[in-house]
């Protein structure tokens, strides 16, 4: 692959992921900031916030389904087709959320519609990460695979940056009443432009060479062979250790991430009563640092291995949650911003190390299904409930220490998986069995 094709592939993986995660995080931020008043106005404030965060969390329910659906599509019909389809579905659902009337207009139908569209978002994002990572990893040289796979992974924090930036502009330029009434919808409707750009970029890239060779082998083979697609049950049975490893590491990373981001926005704006702009700006800066850290950690994992980078990130990020909230409470907005940025740095180390590691655990015929299914189940058991658990623990104990202990408890099984697994850096993806 020449330099121009490489740049096009990396851009397509990053832009497409950014668009999908922008859509996902706009919902997350609005769930923490405004949905309680727009969709649950008849409840007490604390109850309404919990219900609002639950509409955010419910999107994770469909992520394993999306991982399975798009994983099967990707393993049977190609990585590119699955990625284009997932982006189209995500864009449609996000624009529709921007058009849902509030509770004052259509009553209970409003939160019901919100939940249904959130489920569609979860379905779409379930197929995104695996496909983008695989397309890059299967197309580019193995010696820099950690760095290459950082590109699609920056979609998460970069999407968070974009969503935070848009919401900062809206909350700064509009009164609180106008933002709650209609301003937040602009962030969702703007997704139409982003999706159009993402689709155009993704349609320009070629299918991965490894999958092309796999497809060619299937077309000339009669009867069962190593290239024949396995059933989902067979994938789980044959690669259960790899699936468990991805699931637990992803669960630990995701729990820490949502404590550092969504719960942090809630804590800053609702508990400390700081301005929305201050909370979102701190998250924006943290996400920018996260992006840089993912690239650096991915490149470092090519030099020293995936395991030490992941281990350092998991321990550091989980430990930092014990300092993050006291610093935010006691310090100035600048102190909170620095504390949030440190969390972004440590989280980026986890992601930079795990991206190539996950790809290197599965052979080509089942890589999309095995990766996406385990990755998204890990997201459900942690990310879907982390903000809700954080709010519930804070309300019960009146302290953020139990929230930090929860993050640590989720990180420890992930750390055990990292320590116990073999190093995978440099493995030949085509010969994996």
Image (spheres, helix red, strand yellow):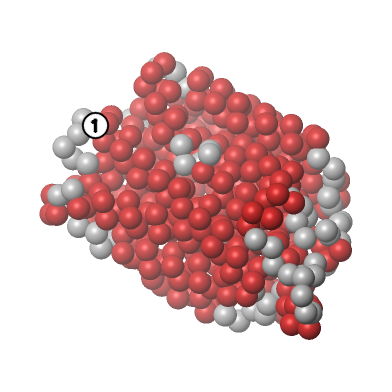
Q: Quadrant of residue 146?
A: bottom right
Residue furthest top in the image: 397
Q: Residue at x 77, y 70 (%)?
A: 224
Provide the residue designation for mark 1.
45
User: For the point 81% across and 35% down, which residue is it?
Assistant: 420
Residue 73 or residue 31, whichever sits in front: 73
Percent coordinates x, y for residue 318 in the rendering: 62, 30
Residue appearing at x 69%, y 55% in the figure = 235
Q: What residue is at 53 percent from the left and 73 percent from the top?
A: 84
In the picture as drawn, the residue positioned furthest to the front comes out as 223
Label 1: how many Cα within 10 Å (few below 14, some 14–19, many 20+): few
Residue 113, can we see it?
yes
**Mark 1 falls on what kind of element?**
helix
Quadrant position of the C terminus in the picture: bottom right
Percent across and percent down for residue 265 are 42, 38
Of residues 131 and 190, the one drawn nearer to the viewer in this rendering: 131
């Amino acid at each position: 692959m020449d330099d121009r094709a490489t740049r096009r592939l990396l851009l397509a993986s990053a832009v497409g992921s950014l668009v999908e995660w922008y859509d996902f995080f706009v919902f997350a931020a609005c769930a923490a900031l405004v949905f309680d008043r727009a969709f649950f106005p008849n409840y007490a404030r604390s109850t309404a916030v919990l219900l609002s965060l639950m509409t955010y969390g419910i999107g994770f329910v469909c992520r394993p389904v999306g991982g399975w659906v798009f994983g099967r599509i990707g393993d049977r019909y190609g990585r590119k087709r699955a990625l284009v389809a997932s982006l189209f579905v995500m864009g449609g659902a996000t624009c529709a959320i921007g058009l849902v009337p509030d509770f004052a207009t259509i009553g209970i139908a409003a939160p019901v519609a919100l939940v249904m569209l959130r489920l569609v978002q979860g379905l779409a994002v379930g197929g995104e990460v695996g496909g983008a990572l695989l397309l890059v990893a299967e197309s580019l040289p193995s010696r820099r695979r950690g760095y290459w796979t950082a590109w699609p992974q920056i979609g998460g924090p970069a999407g968070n940056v974009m969503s935070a930036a848009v919401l900062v502009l809206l909350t700064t330029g509009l009164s609180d009443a106008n933002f709650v009434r209609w301003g937040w919808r602009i962030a969702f409707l703007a997704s139409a432009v982003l999706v159009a750009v993402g689709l155009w970029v993704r349609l320009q890239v070629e299918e991965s060479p490894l999958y092309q060779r796999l497809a060619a082998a299937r077309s000339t083979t009669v009867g069962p062979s190593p290239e024949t697609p396995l059933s989902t049950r067979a994938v789980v049975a044959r690669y259960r250790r790899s699936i468990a490893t991805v699931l637990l590491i992803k669960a630990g990373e995701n729990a820490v991430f949502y404590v550092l981001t969504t719960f942090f926005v809630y804590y800053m704006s609702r508990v400390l009563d700081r301005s929305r702009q201050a909370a979102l700006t701190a998250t924006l800066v943290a996400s920018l640092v996260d992006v840089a850290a993912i690239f650096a950690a991915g490149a470092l994992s090519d030099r020293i291995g995936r395991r030490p980078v992941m281990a350092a990130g998991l321990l550091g990020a989980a430990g930092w949650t014990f300092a993050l909230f006291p610093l935010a409470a006691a310090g100035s907005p600048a102190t909170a911003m620095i504390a949030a940025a440190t969390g972004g740095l440590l989280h980026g180390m986890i992601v930079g190390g795990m991206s190539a590691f996950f790809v290197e655990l599965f052979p080509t015929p089942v890589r999309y299904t095995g990766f996406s299914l385990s990755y998204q189940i890990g997201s459900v058991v942690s990310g879907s409930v982390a903000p809700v658990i954080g709010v519930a623990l804070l309300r019960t104990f009146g302290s953020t220490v139990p929230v930090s202990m929860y993050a640590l408890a989720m990180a420890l099984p992930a750390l055990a998986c990292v320590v116990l697994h073999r190093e995978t850096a440099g493995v030949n993806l085509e010969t994996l069995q």
